[in-house]
Image (cartoon, helix red, strand yellow):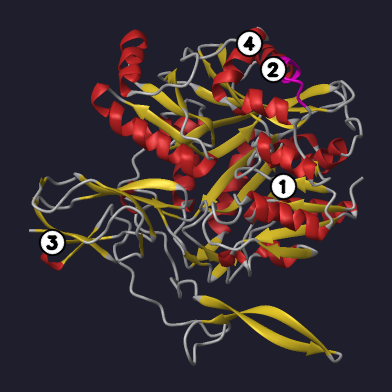
Amino acid sequence: MFERVLIANRGEIAVRVIRACRELGIASVAVYSEVDHRSLHVRLADEAFALGGETAAESYLNTEAILDAVTASGADAVHPGYGFFSENPAFARAVASRGAVFVGPPPEAMEVMGDKVSSRVAAIAAGVPVVPGTDGPISSAAEILAFGAAHGWPVAIKASYGGGGRGMKVVAGPDDAVAALDSARREGQAYFGSSEVYLERYLDWPRHVEMQVFADSHGNAVWMGERDCSSQRRHQKLIEETPAPGMTPELRRAMGEAAVNVSRACGYTNAGTVEFLTQGGEFYFLEMNTRLQVEHPLTELACGIDLVAEQLRVASGSALSFTQESLSPRGHAIECRVNAEDVAGGRFLPSPGRLTRFSRPGGFGVRIDAGYGEGDAITQHYDNLIAKALTWGADREEARRRMLRVLGEMTIEGVATNIDAHLRILRHADFIENRHSTRWVEERLDFSDMTSARAGAGAPPQAETPRDVAVEVDGRRYDVRVWLPEGTGAPTASSPAPARPRGGSGAAAGATGGGRVSAPMQGTIIEVLVSVGEAVTVGQALCVLEAMKMENEVDAERAGTVTEVRVAAGDNVSAGDVLFTIE
């Protein structure tokens, strides 16, 4: 077994791995960006190394900085978590070059399955049905038009190295092809380091069901049961559950065997997830995520197996501690992703800020996985997941009712959350009676009457500046870096600065006096879509604002002529900053 594991990630998954390491007697090493220097994963780890920078590109996607931390810490293994470098074969090889073990599949398997195009080819070779799509990446909107004409609309554009719904855009018709292609490419480049995309037919009412697989280097490969992830918005999973409601034992077995066949076809080892779309009793291979999934705790609750601990054991060379025959999932588990999102008006806008209160419910069959504690800041630079709330029950209804109780008890203040949206989904007759699909949330549910769930909005994250100072310990001089509040006479961390006024209340754009359009949230301007002198209509997109790794259009709330454009692509803006003036 390993002696020291570096976790090349942050937030909830870093905390999850650190805790597993501690239970196994393994020392944990955290890495952190400048904005994460006080984060929970840093506080819990045995030691931590600074990566520098604020954005993902400057920190958690900075290969050399992470590799330097591997060398400096003496880590003999690196756990990538999910996202960032978790499915990057070049990073896995770089880790090996520093004498450490990458806790995941071989780079060759990642190259086959991490690329959504080559993974389709491998699935076909393994005899697994796939959704109709392009045989390779596309380069122009003309290819989208041709595919839509041949297979029908809508069409899905997907980042070849994407996952979690990022880099995926649905094209309703020919008029949307150019904008959707540009957006998918931008998200793919920003989040996965590649702008390559491909096309798939978009099924009209499918279920999203994924199969957890695990394989070792001794030739053993098993499937551990499925997870239904059909409750989605913007192709982002909201609620997941296991087992998939309504699935027959025959279909489950067929999907499980197909998942194992896909894994064996690419020489896979460690934990992985094979995703399928199901419709009308048929299933289609969608993609394979060559890493641990966000929703892996569902399988842990059902099977009674610590998947992270198993990852570490398998990566160290051990055989699987269980067999296909010994697996016996029981009961029903549900997971809700609690995000920092303002659901006001049904817009689900990112809601960065500081958690001034965070109560975690407990009780039988309850698990809360979180990457933050009270006082921690949720910034615009990373995803908006605050916590995962999980409940287990003897059957689906017991798990559902327990989740209603847990979400009702959970109190989060300082940021807005999507808890009320979860409650609406869980109480809906379609969900209770298993009539939902991946398109159900967006096409059948109405969140427009919802108000902001922001409670007790406190101070925004207080700006701090690193200072290099000299200290003496037992007569020996050391140069150290400390973080101090900005400004002369600035308050300490225990006495936060006064709250800044926030613009907007969850609208797509904040409208102020004189036709000024303000930023609804903190973020980065990706593209400006209008110019001075241009006539605009109500609802027209003025710019694209990225926050928490999601693109959001800022729309005009009045018709008129643009008389002022105050931003350009690449600008960072705060909530309430004026972006445009419309007269």
Residue indicated by mark 1: 365
Q: Is residue 304 magenta?
A: no
Residue indicated by mark 2: 262
The quadrant of the picture occupied by the N terminus is: top right
Specify the amino acid type for callout 3: Gly
Q: CA distance from mark 1 to mark 2?
A: 33 Å
Q: Is residue 102 visible?
A: no
Q: Nearer the viewer, residue 370 or 433?
A: 370
In the image: residue 247, left or right of residue 535: right
Residue indicated by mark 3: 515
Task: State the predominant SS element of the stretch in magenta.
Answer: helix
The stretch of residues the image draws in magenta is 261-268
Which of the marked residues, 1 or 4, is nearer the chain's N terminus? 4
Q: Nearer the viewer, mark 1 or mark 3?
A: 3
Crowd rating for badge 2 (residues with CA inside 10 Å; few <14, some 14–19, many 20+): many
For mark 1, give the secondary structure. loop
385 over 428 or under it: above or below = below
x and y percent of residue 450 in the render? 34, 52
Q: CA distance from mark 2 to mark 3?
A: 56 Å
Proximity of marks 4 and 2: CB atoms separated by less than 8 Å = yes
149 over 536 or under it: above or below = above
x and y percent of residue 314 in the render? 86, 35
For mark 2, give the secondary structure. helix
Specify the amino acid type for callout 1: Gly
